[in-house]
Image (cartoon, helix red, strand yellow):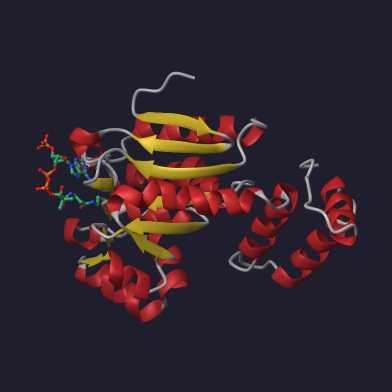
Amino acid sequence: MEFENILTENNDGILQIIINRPKKLNALNRDTIQELHDAFLDAKDDEEVKVVILTGTGEKAFVAGADISEFSDFSAEEGRELAADGQAKLFDFVANFPKPVIAAVNGFALGGGLELAMAAHFRVASDNAKMGLPETSLGLIPGYGGTQRLPQLVGKGRAMEMIMTAGMIDANQALQYNLVNHVCEPEELIEFTEKIAKKIMKNSLVAMSAAIRAVNANYEDGVNGFEVEISEFGSSFGTEDFKEGTSAFLNKRKADFPGK
Ligand code: COA
């Protein structure tokens, strides 16, 4: 598929999806959100894709937010639609993606950029990264899940402070806040993230999808995550990966998961 605002590159099962609007610090306009949706949709059914790494072009920005020039004259109704459409198409889509998604945060991750990184299953940052939700400085609040996912990751008090001050934290503070799992040198970011992806790929990707559903159930209103876990645990026994995983262990060999 041809894209204008993103690049994709599959290296042995690790698909990099790279937001590529460097002149606008990779800000998310409508077309970019649509292209990201399409790229994830493709990746979902593509058996050659095992893990996705989401990152931005260049060393300056992961994503500097939603494209402000696109919504500066929006009405309340248009604003509501913008958030609802973006959440469904991209942010919730990534959060519930059945394959692991890792955000490699390579610079500014602001507003929608931090919200996108937070929608990924976990985050690795380069030491020059800066993260924040500056929406209140624009007379807005975060609209792509930021008011929900930031408190889940860093706790209510820290999230409130970040949202209210509209300030940025650096990569080391993000590490201390549990917002990112690792910090590394900018030039090592992709290699380091790929190493984690390779570790993930040794395990059952069928089990990975079930784990994503079970972990996410904890954050869904009215859903009992323990019950989802019991059900997903039970279903795992019916998979070929379970048979391979247990038989490999009992026969003291490495598992070669069929992914079914
Ligand atoms: N939407 C639209 N355009 C954006 C953008 C955004 N969120 N973030 C950056 N850009 C554009 C700038 O307008 C500028 O375009 P121009 O060269 O045509 O004028 C270009 O990207 C470079 O940004 P610039 O501001 O000149 O870079 P900087 O190094 O001085 O500052 C930031 C970097 C990230 C601090 C600054 O760009 C910024 O504050 N961006 C907005 C962040 C934000 O509020 N995001 C939340 C949106 S809801």
Image quarter for ligand 1: top left
Is residue 145 in view?
Answer: no
**Percent x, y for residue 205?**
70, 48
**Can residue 68 be seen?**
yes
User: Which residue is drawn at the image coordinates 22% and 62% (left, top)?
Assistant: 136
Q: Position of residue 168 (x, y in %)?
A: 22, 65
Expressed as whole percent of the image width and height from the top left, the position of residue 201 reads: 64, 48
For the C terminus, the quadrant is top right
Q: Nearer the viewer, residue 169 or 255?
A: 255
Q: Position of residue 132 (x, y in %)?
A: 27, 62
Q: Is residue 56 above or below residue 219?
A: above
| Left or right side of 68 for 46 | right
Count of picture labels:
0
Q: Quadrant of residue 226?
A: bottom right
> Residue at image x 36%, y 70%?
175
Q: Residue at x 41, y 73 (%)?
A: 154
